[in-house]
Amino acid sequence: MRVIVLGGGVVGVTTAYQLQKDGHEVVILDRQAQVAAETSWGNAGMIAPGHSFVWSSPKAPMILLKSLLLKDQALRFKLSADPRLYSWSWLFLMECTAEKARRNTLLKHRLAAYSQSVLHEVIADEQIDYDRNDRGIVYFHRSQQALDKGVEHMKLLESDGQEIRVLDRDGVVALDPSLASARDKIAGGIYCPTDETGDPAKFTRALAAKIVERGGEIRTGTTITGIETSGDGVTQVLTDKGEFKGDAYVLALGSYSPLIAEAIGIGLPIYPIKGYSLTIPVGNRPHPPTIASVDEHNLVAISRFGDRIRVTATAEFAGYDTSHKPADFAFMKGVTQELYPEGADYDRAEMWAGLRPMTPNNLPEFGRRRLRNLYLNTGHGHIGWTMSHGSASITADLIAGRQPAISMDGLLN
C-alpha cells in the first residue's frame, strides 16, 4: 500500500521504517525544515524501561496543588483559560489511584521493554551512529530514606523483569568517577544496567536518510492543514503544499495530533506538557559524565552524547507555548554544575523548550477510531524515544493485520 505518515518525529520516522520493511510505499509529512526538529530534538535521549513509572500516581494531585503555590517545583501546573487543560486534568486525576498507577506502569514497562528489543533489531540491521551509550542509567537519591523508598518502588518493575542493582554512594562513584566531587551529596542509587542512551534526533535523521535511499518520500516544510474523509475512510491529507493521497494513513503528530483529529470527529486525550533542556559542549573539561544519571531528588536527567551532555528537567502545563528565558534553566544548570563541576562548558549551554504529548494514563494511543484506514500512533509523553520502536512495529502489525509480538490487552482501546 501507499501509506502517508503524518509527523516526522522519532515516532513517525520509525513507523515509516517498519512499514517500508513490510513492502509499503511510504510518505512522511512534517512542517519543519527537517525531521526530528521538535519534541524528538531536545529530550533526554534515554531508552529507559527502568523509568517506566507513570506520572498519574496517588502522589500526583498533591504535587500539582503544591505547584500552584511554589514556583520551584519540577512539575508546574498553571491556571489557564484553556478548557482542554481542565478536561484533560480531570481524566488524569481519575488515573491517580494506586491500582491504576500499578496497572498503567506495568503496561508502560511492557511496551518500553519490547520497544528496546525492536531498537536492538534495527541497529543490528542498520549502521547508525547516534552516540549510543549502553552502560545503563543510574537513578540516584540524596538521602537514605529516599533511596529506601526508591528501592521499594522499583520492586514493581523488578517483578516484571527489569534488572536493578542497588548501589551505595561508593558504588555510584565507582560506576561514574565523574561524580566523585559530589560523593557526599549522594546516599546511593538504583542502577539499571540494561537501560541506555543515545541522541534521538541524530538517530531519527539517519534512519530517515535510509528510508529515502530505499525509495521513501519525506516532505519537510509541509504543514498539514486538515484531513478529508468520505464515508468510513480518509481520502486525502490537505497541506500548504497540496494534497496527499494514500491507501492508509498514520497519525503521529505528537502534541498536535488532537488538533487534527478533532476536526474529523476523533477525540484524543492528549495534552502538551512543556519540558526544558540544555545541550552543553564538553569542550576540554576533564570529568564529563560517563553514563546517564537521574537526580531523583531534583528530577534532573543528565545524558552524555559524545562531545555534548544533555540536561532535562521540569514539566510545565503551558499549552502550546514553547517560549523560554534563561531563568527557566538556572536550576537544572546549577544542579548539573554541582554534580559535575568539571563536566562541561556550562557557559556555552544551548537552551531549548518543547512539548511532550501526554495522555492521562501515560500510554500512547494505537489503532483505529471510526475510520477504517487511519491508524493512531501518538501520545507517547515523556519517554517517546523509549517507546517509539515498539510502537512503530505494533502499528505496522496492525496495518498488516498481524498479531503484534506483545499482548495488546490494555494497550489497544
Image (cartoon, helix red, strand yellow):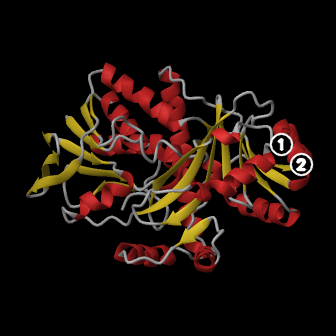
From the image, tell me which residue sits under label 2: 183
- Front-most of 34 and 7? 34
Task: Say which of 361 and 401 sits in front.
Answer: 361
Q: Quadrant of the N terminus?
A: top left
Query: Which quadrant of the figure has residue 141?
Result: bottom right
Q: Please tell me whether residue 79 is drawn above or below residue 304 in the rendered image.
A: below
Left or right: 194 as drawn, with respect to 406: right
Q: Which residue is mark 1?
A: 179
Amino acid at pointer 1: Leu
Identify which residue, 315 or 123, lies in the foreground.
315
- Residue 321, horizontal then vertical, whole percent: 42, 61
- Say which quarter of the image contains residue 207: top left
The image quadrant that residue 409 belongs to is bottom left
- Whether residue 122 is visible to the viewer of this picture, yes or no, is yes
Residue 50 on image: x %, y %: 65, 50
* Amino acid type of the residue tagged 2 in the rendering: Arg
- Badge count: 2
Tell me the quadrant of the picture where the C terminus can be found: bottom left
Q: Position of residue 101 (x, y in %)?
A: 58, 69
Residue 100, horizontal then vertical, whole percent: 54, 71
The residue positioned 23% from the left and 45% from the top of the image is 249
* Residue at 85% from the left image edge and 53% from the top image edge: 188
Question: As drawn, is 322 to the left or to the right of 167?
Answer: left
Q: Is residue 408 left or right of residue 262?
A: right
Where 48 sits versus 261, above or below? Answer: above
Q: Is residue 59 left or right of residue 23?
A: right
Q: Residues within 10 Å of mark 2 (few under 14, many from 20)?
A: some
Disc 2, disc 1: CB below 8 Å? yes
